[in-house]
Image (cartoon, rainbow, N blue to C red):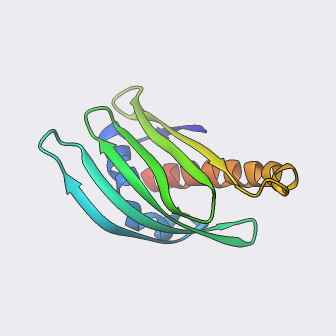
Amino acid sequence: MRERLVASADDVWKRICDIESYPTFMDSVIRTQVLSEETRPDGITEAVTEWEVLLKGSVLKWSEREVRDPSQWRLTYEQVAGDLERFAGFWQVTKVTEEITEATLEVDFEIGIPMLRPMLEPVAVRAIEKNSSDMLVSLGRRAD
């Protein structure tokens, strides 16, 4: 999912990295918490965060490992524990002009229940796409 925002790339990057503020402006995010965070000498930050997100009337919970590379405006994440078999992806910030920035949110997941996958996965894909789109739109509203 990709959204163009009226904000500088640095501002969008700061908002994306401020994980604990997500519940204040994203309806689907119930709770986030940074459990650990360490910035390496090369400027890359590694963090572990906990999430609770409302998805189609159900609450999903997970912990993820995040790697934030400010030189590339890229945050990658991967579930380390939680409700899904696999949940990973990235945020990418791209400067279009001084005032316009493109934010991309990519999500890759697997439900992990083989017998229910054909029935649940299409519903989950649509729900995660909507949540991702809502997150980008919320980020854009926050940038206004």
Classify residue 99 by image quadrant: top left
Looking at this view, name the residue that lies furthest to the front: 114
Report the side of 61 relative to 38 (left or right): right
Looking at this view, name the residue that lies furthest to the left: 41
Classify residue 29 by image quadrant: bottom right
Foreground residue, 107 or 132? 107
Q: State whether residue 144 appears in this view.
A: no
Report the side of 65 relative to 126 (left or right): left
Where in the figure is residue 54, as x and y percent of width and height? 65, 69
Which residue: 79% across, 53% down?
Answer: 114
Position of the N terminus, as image quadrant, is top right
As drawn, 135 above or below 54: above
Where in the figure is residue 136, as x and y percent of width and height? 55, 48
Q: State whether residue 94 appears in this view.
A: yes
Classify residue 30 by image quadrant: bottom right
Q: How many marks?
A: 0
Report the side of 2 relative to 130 (left or right): left
Looking at this view, name the residue that lies furthest to the right: 119
As drawn, 59 above or below 2: below
Where in the figure is residue 66, as x and y percent of width and height? 38, 51
As drawn, 80 above or below 140: below
Which residue: 34% across, 37% down?
Answer: 73
Which residue: 54% across, 55% down?
Answer: 138
Which residue: 31% across, 32% down?
Answer: 72
Report the side of 19 relative to 120 (left or right): left
